[in-house]
Image (cartoon, grey):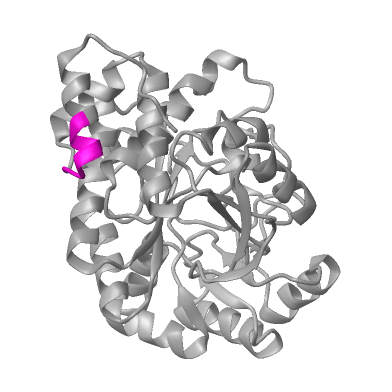
Amino acid sequence: MNVAIPTEDKQMQDIIEKVRSGERLTREDGEFLYRSDDLLTIGQLANEANMRKNGRKVYFIENMSLYFTNVCEAHCAFCNFRKDKGEEGSYTLSGAEMIEYVEQHIHPGVREFHIVGGHNNHVPFQYYVDSLKALHERYPDITLKAYTAAEIDFFSRISGLSYREVLEELMKAGLKSLTGGGAEILSDEYRKKMKVDKADVSQYLEVHRTAHNLGLRTHTTMLYGSVEKHADRINHMLQIRELQDETNGFLVFIPLSMQPISPKAGIRRRNSAFEDLKTIAISRLMLDNFQHIKAYFINIGTQLTQVSLTMGASDVHGTIVKERISHAAGALTPEGITREDLIWLVKGAGRIPIERDTFYNEVKIYE
């Protein structure tokens, strides 16, 4: 049985009562939780909220990250993945070249391709359609979770098609879900400061709204830990929560801890473990209409991911196989992880590992 840690703070007591009675937390509640240093109470409340939704089940997927191109017209301040065309290390793979790469790295059991990349304006929209088509024809049983809302906006610009038309073309080619990237912080002021040279706040939300209306279930993220204030993070969550109220199309919320440009950067250039755990817990408490909050081990490490499972997280992502974007930006974590290690990680937190598909259908329970 969970026993809340006693607290003298009246506002914290009010929040505890709200969470336990199923009352929605407000903007002021979220900002208070970020100001509080009572991580144990916040974490325990998030754990209670998660246990009501998911019990002791923690989900993961056998997946593989694919990147067709790193050439990008955008120059976002936080990105170390992008290249200019012709720059050393730049590449744009054809469908056949990607299949060759997959054949070399795939392992039995992969259920999902997670596909993102640069906004390469040196190739037409058809290139992006054909990329999916080639994979779908070669691996018809593997789900294509592809492209961010920012990429969909970019495709719309280079093709002259509406968001709906872009998505319909991609769905014909095999698209089954959108990735969550491109959200960063949903604040136009933040996007200006960080030179987020792609879809703005309203465009990001409109792409997901359109996808949901077409029947696609999608993912969504928040990249935190740079110039934003805690109030900006709460505002981000509220905008996502509002869209979820409207469409119920999001599968999971993924807080992404900002990585420094250099792997040699000291700990002061990284989010603290305290901040990472608090953000996962607050996400669980604020996003009452989301089934899952993901702990992304690529950014916070496997051991902190394990701790987060008692602080509101119900998903540990997947096996990945050679992640590149966070590692280009200085992530110190493994580029991938085995199924056995993921199972051990979840069991080590006293939880039940559940292998899932993209849509959180249970594939196998590891009791």
- Whether residue 263 sits left or right of residue 58 in the image: it is right
Please name whichever residue, 138 or 13, is drawn nearer the observer in this view of the structure.
13
x%, y% of residue 66? 65, 64
Visible residue check, residue 336: no
Give the residue furthest to the front.
1
Total count of labels: 0
Q: Quadrant of the C terminus?
A: bottom right
Q: Is residue 347 left or right of residue 356?
A: right
Q: Is residue 191 left or right of residue 265?
A: left
Magenta-colored stretch includes residue 21:
yes
In depth, the one of 116 and 239 nearer the eye is 239
Q: Residue at x 35, y 32 (%)?
A: 45
Q: Which residue: 66% across, 31% down?
A: 303
- Placement of the N terminus among the 4 image quadrants: top left
Relative to 254, say whether 149 is above or below. Answer: below
Image position, residue 108 (x, y; %): 80, 72
Q: Nearer the viewer, residue 315 or 44?
A: 44
Residue 301's quadrant in the figure? top right
Residue at 38% x, 38% y is 48
Residue 126 position, x and y percent, is: 49, 83
The secondary structure that most of the magenta stretch takes on is helix
Q: Which residues are magenta?
A: 17-23
- The quadrant in which residue 20 appears is top left
Q: Is residue 293 magenta?
A: no
